[in-house]
Image (cartoon, rainbow, N blue to C red):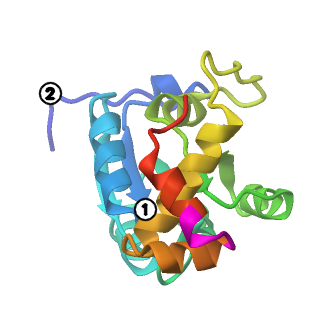
């Protein structure tokens, strides 16, 4: 037994929670590593998983106090992970991230125990604010919200990466002409 460590009782304010163990489950490896570094710099002890199976295994071995989970993963739904997290640790605060936001999925995520539901691309500050928000507190408006053009561009880039940078396949999946897609990809990201 460690005599030098004292544990403070949990309070309703998540910022006061001593233990800041975070599980991030996302199959977008570059996003996963960037977000993990960003959350570590904010004081979290971070574990990562790239699919539902790894996420469930991480929860089974040691349920985290916080989680950021992508909705659509290569081997299933992030809703399975959030549901298991809430079953193993009811006080955990989980955030669902998705590039395919819709009301039905948001409601389902919250019913299964998600604390919040954010549309991708969400930055580390937004995610941190959502994780640390006090229940029933109205979130602040973002200082510099993304333009609709930027959101569209980010979505196109994500699909392009998921298609292994294949322009023809990306254009087919986005239901757009290949030349139109090439012009969009050649331009800089809008602000």
Task: Return the mark for residue 25.
Answer: 1
Which residue lies at the image location 57% right of the left edge and 48% below the top edge? 153
Which residue position holds label 2? 4
Extreme residue in the bottom direction? 75
Which residue lies at the image location 72% right of the left edge and 60% below the top edge? 109
Residue 119 can be seen, yes or no: no
Q: Quadrant of the N terminus?
A: top left
Q: Magenta span has 78?
A: no
Front residue of this view, candidates 126 and 112:
126
- Left or right of 6? Residue 188 is right
Give the vertical position of 80 relative to 158 (above or below): below
- Left or right of 63? Residue 41 is left
- Left or right of 83? Residue 75 is left
| Of callouts 1 and 2, the N-terminal one | 2
Give the vertical position of 136 relative to 68 (above or below): above
Give the vertical position of 150 relative to 94 (above or below): above
């Amino acid at each position: 037994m460690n005599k030098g460590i004292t544990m403070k009782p949990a309070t309703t304010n998540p910022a006061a929670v001593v233990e800041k163990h975070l599980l991030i489950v996302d199959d977008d490896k570059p996003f996963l590593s960037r977000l993990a570094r960003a959350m570590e710099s904010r004081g979290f002890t971070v574990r990562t998983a790239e699919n539902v199976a790894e996420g469930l295994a991480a929860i089974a071995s040691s349920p985290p106090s916080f989680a950021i989970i992508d909705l659509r993963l290569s081997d299933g739904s992030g809703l399975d992970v959030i549901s298991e997290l809430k079953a193993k640790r009811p006080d955990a605060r989980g955030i669902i991230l998705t590039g395919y936001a819709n009301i039905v999925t948001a409601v389902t995520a919250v019913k299964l125990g998600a604390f919040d539901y954010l549309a991708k691309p969400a930055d580390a500050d937004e995610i941190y604010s959502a994780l640390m928000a006090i229940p029933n507190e109205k979130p602040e408006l973002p200082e510099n919200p993304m333009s609709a053009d930027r959101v569209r561009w980010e979505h196109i880039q994500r699909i392009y990466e998921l298609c292994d940078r294949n322009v023809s396949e990306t254009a087919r999946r986005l239901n757009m002409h290949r030349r139109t897609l090439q012009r969009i990809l050649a331009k800089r990201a809008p602000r």
